[in-house]
Every structure is written in C-alpha cells, then in structure tokens.
Image: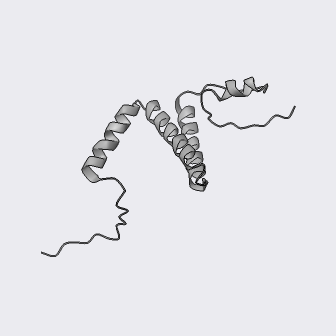
C-alpha cells in the first residue's frame, strides 16, 4: 500500500471519512503555536484555491476560506458572532466593497 505524506490541517471529520473508505490514517492533534502555524498555512492554501476556482467551485472555496477564518478567530479567543458583529459594524461605518471604488491618491486640500 502506497503512503502519501500531507502534513496539513484538515477538517475535523476527514480522518474518519478516510477510515470509512478503508484507508489507514495517521494524524495528530495540534496545540498552541504549531496549530497557529498550520492555520495560517491552511489560510494561504485556501486563498490560492479560491483564486484559481472556476465558477462551479467558487461557492465551495468561499465556504472553505470562511471556515479557516472562523477557526483562526476561535483559536485567538474570538467567536463567530463577534466576527460577524464587527464585520457589520465596520460595514455600517465605512461601507463594504460593493461600489467598486479604487482609491488613486490623497493629497493635501487647498484652503
């Protein structure tokens, strides 16, 4: 049996799903800074997958990216509801990105 090394963070049920398919799975549960490091690697991986996703995979990749963002927040003591509250607060104060505004420059005003 061929063994493939991954050494990457996976979703919680993934090891069980692979075992159910008759695969032999080796894994460990990470803590502290090692978990933080792997979360950031996963974030970067998901950003790249999102960037290259076709229309048919776009929603799935957005969901994966959000799940990693929520995991990063939780690891740092921030709940999903706190993230959403702050997102709404910032959107109400500064707007979102729907107007597609590109800031070109800011200079001193003439008085």
Q: Name the quarter where the C terminus is drawn.
A: bottom left
Counting labels gives: 0
Q: Which residue is drawn at 53% across and 35% down?
A: 36
Position of residue 43 measured from the top left corner of the image (x, y, whole percent):
54, 44
Relative to the observer, which residue lies in front, 89 or 2?
Answer: 89
Q: Is residue 56 above or below residue 79?
A: below
Residue farthest right in this picture: 1
Relative to the observer, which residue lies in front, 56 or 67?
Answer: 56
Relative to the observer, which residue lies in front, 7 or 96?
Answer: 96
- Is residue 60 shown to the viewer in this render? yes
Q: Residue at x 51, y 37 (%)?
A: 67
Residue farthest front in this picture: 56
Q: Which residue is drawn at 41% across and 29% down?
A: 77
Residue 103 placement, left or right of 17: left
Position of residue 86 measured from the top left corner of the image (x, y, whole percent):
32, 40
Q: Which residue is drawn at 52% across and 41% down?
A: 63
Q: Name the quarter where the N terminus is drawn.
A: top right
Q: In this view, does 53 lie above or below 80?
A: below
Q: Which colour scheme is used?
A: one colour
Position of residue 28 measured from the top left corner of the image (x, y, whole percent):
66, 25
Position of residue 58 measured from the top left corner of the image (x, y, whole percent):
56, 50
Q: Is residue 3 above or below residue 107?
A: above
Q: Is residue 100 above or below residue 41?
A: below
């Amino acid at each position: 049996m061929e063994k493939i090394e991954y050494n990457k963070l996976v979703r919680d049920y993934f090891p069980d799903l692979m075992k159910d398919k008759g695969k032999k799975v080796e894994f460990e549960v990470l803590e502290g800074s090692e978990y933080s490091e792997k979360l950031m690697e996963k974030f970067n991986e998901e950003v790249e997958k999102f960037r290259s996703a076709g229309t048919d995979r776009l929603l799935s990749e957005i969901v994966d990216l959000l799940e990693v963002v929520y995991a990063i927040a939780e690891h740092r003591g921030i709940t999903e509801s706190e993230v959403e509250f702050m997102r709404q607060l910032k959107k109400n104060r500064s707007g979102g990105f729907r107007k597609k505004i590109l800031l070109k420059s800011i200079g001193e005003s003439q008085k």
